[in-house]
Amino acid sequence: MPAVWNAPVASPCISVCRMDDVTGLCVGCLRTLDEIAAWGALDDAARRRVWQAIATRRDRVDPQRCAPDIDA
């Protein structure tokens, strides 16, 4: 098994924590509130599934809707 598979799964949080009312996603990491709340208790397999969901969301969500606004 490659060593990267044994490495801890990093959090997708980029410290831009603001929920979009329309999508229900954090504009920084594209996670739901449930995913954010559960992250600390998830095993690595579940964390990888969250990352996969984020990748799918990135393809579907309007980038102007969920884009961190660092000037805000």
Image (cartoon, grey):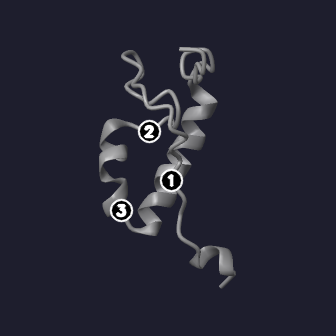
Q: Residue 44 carries which label?
A: none
Residue 60, given in percent of the width and then of the height, sits at: 58, 27
Disc 3 + disc 2, Cβ < 8 Å: no
Q: Quick one: label 3 or label 2, which is nearer the N terminus?
A: 2
Please name the residue that numbered disc 1 is placed on. Answer: 11
Q: Which of 52 and 12 is in front in this view?
A: 12
Q: Which of marks 3 and 1 is in front?
A: 1
Instruction: Give the spatial CA distance, label 3 vs label 1.
Output: 11 Å
Please name the residue that numbered disc 2 is placed on. Answer: 31
Residue at 46% across, 68% down = 44
Looking at the rendered structure, the secondary structure element under dot 3 is: loop
Labels in figure, total: 3
Residue at 55% across, 50% down = 52
Q: Nearer the viewer, residue 43 or 10?
A: 10
Q: Callout 3: few (<14), some (14-19), or many (20+) C-alpha neighbours within 10 Å?
A: few
Instruction: Give the spatial CA distance, label 2 vs label 1.
Output: 11 Å
The quarter of the picture where residue 46 lies is bottom left
Please name the residue that numbered disc 3 is placed on. Answer: 42
Residue 26, given in percent of the width and then of the height, sits at: 44, 30
Q: Which of 17 and 30 is in front in this view?
A: 17
Residue at 59% across, 22% down = 67
Vertical order, 52 against 45 (above or below): above
Vertical order, 14 against 69 (above or below): below
Q: Which of 70 and 46 is in front in this view?
A: 70
Residue sitting farthest toward the right: 2
Residue sitting farthest toward the front: 71
